[in-house]
């Protein structure tokens, strides 16, 4: 955690947002600042979901699935090696099995052998299992060559994806993606697992209307909303109204214990109580442990954990994922130090005039961890970052993370158009993307990407402003307020958890763990005392008696059967200029 001064800005609160006057004033302020009407913020019931009938791409996919069911064809799910892909895969395996598909299997590309998506190499592996139908989840919209290879082998493909499409679409028998140009579905931010859930819901409804399954089958698909919640939060897609419903409903099932044993095991492996699970627990405990498999080896053990029905087996597999996650943390810590050294070595670093975008590479970096490094450096230096690792075949695999104001996939597209042949392949979202380069093209890419980012970002966007929901009074620094905010979620990307700013006096400070700081604080007037934890902020600063400015979240700290309020420090600095 840096001591560098960063400007702290209070989110504006539009007066035009209609909010229920019965809501606590603090929640009215928070919801209005997120431009969310009160009724929408509070409505997390399944009835608020956009109906499946509005998702036009589902119809041909359902028809092809009905044919596969009638002909008893083998269905093979082709997933992805992250948490969204793993939950999507497990969801379809469970859901199709419950709807009477007798042969459902899955195949997950290996990051280090076949790369991302349904490439021709993956099709060859799939063909060995003799499927009648392939379904991609969380990938496929860019797999033009792979789908063509499947068709040449006489294998139909249904593509379900949420990534932004390119100019050429694969010639699949059905394309299910809310971001297709002619798709009327209004909520474009579904994760891959959200798209898979809509496909299952539409299929269940069609089978029920035909009398081939119980009329309750569509409702029964909600039994796996824990998987939808986990994949949605872990993929950091914006929590618009539709996604908040999916996450809230999944969390309800997790808290009640009516969910996959694997999800419970992942939460417990991360030291979280499933009975009190919140979105942050999915994003910071379950998600990273699931992702660790795809980052370091392959996602098979993660999917097996999500598919396990025996809690003992699920716990054992979660233990394997925990071991991988510990290994990932060690690797990430080393690479992060090396990345910071690369930034500090830039000629402009001494003047604090870094370029508008950063490109980082070391020949010994790990492909599975560069995305995390890009995110960490982005957070510290407030500009888009691409981190690269070698693939061992003369190419570099890059992972990009962006900042508000720069659509990183579109920026990569601009580079690809203005510098033909520089980028071999790319894809992604507004805030994250992946790409492939020749090793020899790194310097040219660095120059072109920074120039393209500089055209879209001004100096103010690169200052790293911290947005908050203002200050809390001493009377609001209570357990009741923390519990109110905890219950007002789910919070996440695009519906950020409330953070606040304030000035406090340090009564005591001591280092805990490895590089974390536990603080005892009081408001300057001494009317309230409260504890705080600052991760990544080693001693010796600040010291007893010093005034500090903080950006923090109010948190319920539950331990040894007790519940108390504490501040989770997001940024700590001396009183600003």
Image: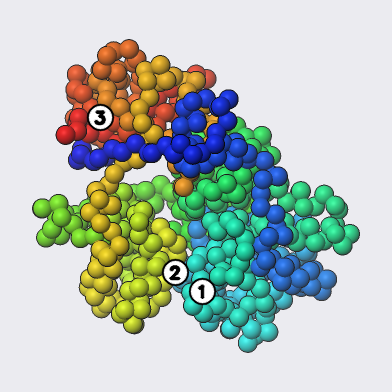
| Screen quadrant of the N terminus | top left
The residues bearing labels 1 and 2 have C-alpha atoms spaced at a distance of 8 Å
| Image location (x, y in percent) of residue 391 | 36, 72
Q: For the view shown, which residue lies furthest in the right direction?
A: 211
Whole-percent x and y of residue 218? Answer: 77, 52
Q: Which mark is residue 549?
A: 3
> For numbered disc 3, what is the local secondary structure?
strand
Relative to 358, residue 394 above or below: below
| SS for dot 2 | strand
Q: Are marks 1 and 2 in contact (CB under 8 Å)?
A: yes
Which is nearer the eye, 528 or 130?
528
User: Is 195 or 430 nearer to us in this picture?
Assistant: 430
Residue at image coords 82%, 49%? 216
Label 3 crowd bin: few (<14), some (14–19), many (20+), radius 10 Å: some
Q: Which residue is mark 2?
A: 427
**Label 1 vs 3, first from the N-terminus:** 1
State the CA–CA distance, disc 1 to disc 3: 47 Å
């Amino acid at each position: 955690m840096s001591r560098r001064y960063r400007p702290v800005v209070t989110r504006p609160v539009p007066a035009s947002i209609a909010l229920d006057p019965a809501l606590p004033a603090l929640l009215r302020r928070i919801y209005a600042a997120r431009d969310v009407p009160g009724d929408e913020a509070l409505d997390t019931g399944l009835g608020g979901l956009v109906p499946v009938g509005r998702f036009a791409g589902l119809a041909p996919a359902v028809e092809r699935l009905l044919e596969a069911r009638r002909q008893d064809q083998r269905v093979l799910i082709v997933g992805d090696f992250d948490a969204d892909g793993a939950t999507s895969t497990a969801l379809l395996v469970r859901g199709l099995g419950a709807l009477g598909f007798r042969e459902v299997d899955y195949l997950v590309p290996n990051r280090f052998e076949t790369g991302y998506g349904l490439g021709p190499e993956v099709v060859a592996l799939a063909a060995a299992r003799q499927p009648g139908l392939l379904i991609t989840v969380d990938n496929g919209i860019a797999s033009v060559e792979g789908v063509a290879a499947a068709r040449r082998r006489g294998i139909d493909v249904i593509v379900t994806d949420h990534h932004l499409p390119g100019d050429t679409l694969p010639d699949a028998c059905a394309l299910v993606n809310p971001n297709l140009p002619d798709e009327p579905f209004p909520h474009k931010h579904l994760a891959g697992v959200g798209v898979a859930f809509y496909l299952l819901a539409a299929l269940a409804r069609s089978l029920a209307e035909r009398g081939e399954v119980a009329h309750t089958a569509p409702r029964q698909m909600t039994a796996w909303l824990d998987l939808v919640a986990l994949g949605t939060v872990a993929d950091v897609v914006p929590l618009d109204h539709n996604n908040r419903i999916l996450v809230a409903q999944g969390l309800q099932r997790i808290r009640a214990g009516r969910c996959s044993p694997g999800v419970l095991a992942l939460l417990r492996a991360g030291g979280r109580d499933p009975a009190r699970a919140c979105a942050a627990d999915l994003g910071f405990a379950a998600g990273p442990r699931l992702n660790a498999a795809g980052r370091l080896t392959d996602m098979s053990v993660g999917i097996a954990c999500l598919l396990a029905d025996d809690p003992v087996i699920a716990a054992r597999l979660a233990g394997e994922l925990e071991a991988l996650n510990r290994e990932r943390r060690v690797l990430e810590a080393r690479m992060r130090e090396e990345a910071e050294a690369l930034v500090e070595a830039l000629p402009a670093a001494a003047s604090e005039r870094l370029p508008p975008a950063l490109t980082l590479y070391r020949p010994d970096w790990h492909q599975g961890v560069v995305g995390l490094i890009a995110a960490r450096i982005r957070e510290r230096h407030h500009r888009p970052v691409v981190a690269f690792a070698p693939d061992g075949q003369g190419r570099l695999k890059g992972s990009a993370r962006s900042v508000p104001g720069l659509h990183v996939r579109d920026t990569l597209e601009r580079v690809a158009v203005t510098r033909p042949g520089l980028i071999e392949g790319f894809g992604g979202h507004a805030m994250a993307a992946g790409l492939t380069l020749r090793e020899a093209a790194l310097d040219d890419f660095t120059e072109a990407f920074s120039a393209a980012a500089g055209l879209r970002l001004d100096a103010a966007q690169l200052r790293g402003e911290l947005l908050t929901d203002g200050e809390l009074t001493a009377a609001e620094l209570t357990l009741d307020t923390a519990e109110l905010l905890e219950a007002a979620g789910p919070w996440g990307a695009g519906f950020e958890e409330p953070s606040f700013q304030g000035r406090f006096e340090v009564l005591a400070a001591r280092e805990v763990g490895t590089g974390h700081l536990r603080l005892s604080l009081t408001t300057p007037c001494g009317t309230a005392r409260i504890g705080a934890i600052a991760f990544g902020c080693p001693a010796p600063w600040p010291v007893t008696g010093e005034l500090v400015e903080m950006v923090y979240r109010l948190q319920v700290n539950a331990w040894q059967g007790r519940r108390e309020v504490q501040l989770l420090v997001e940024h700590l600095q001396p009183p600003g200029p």
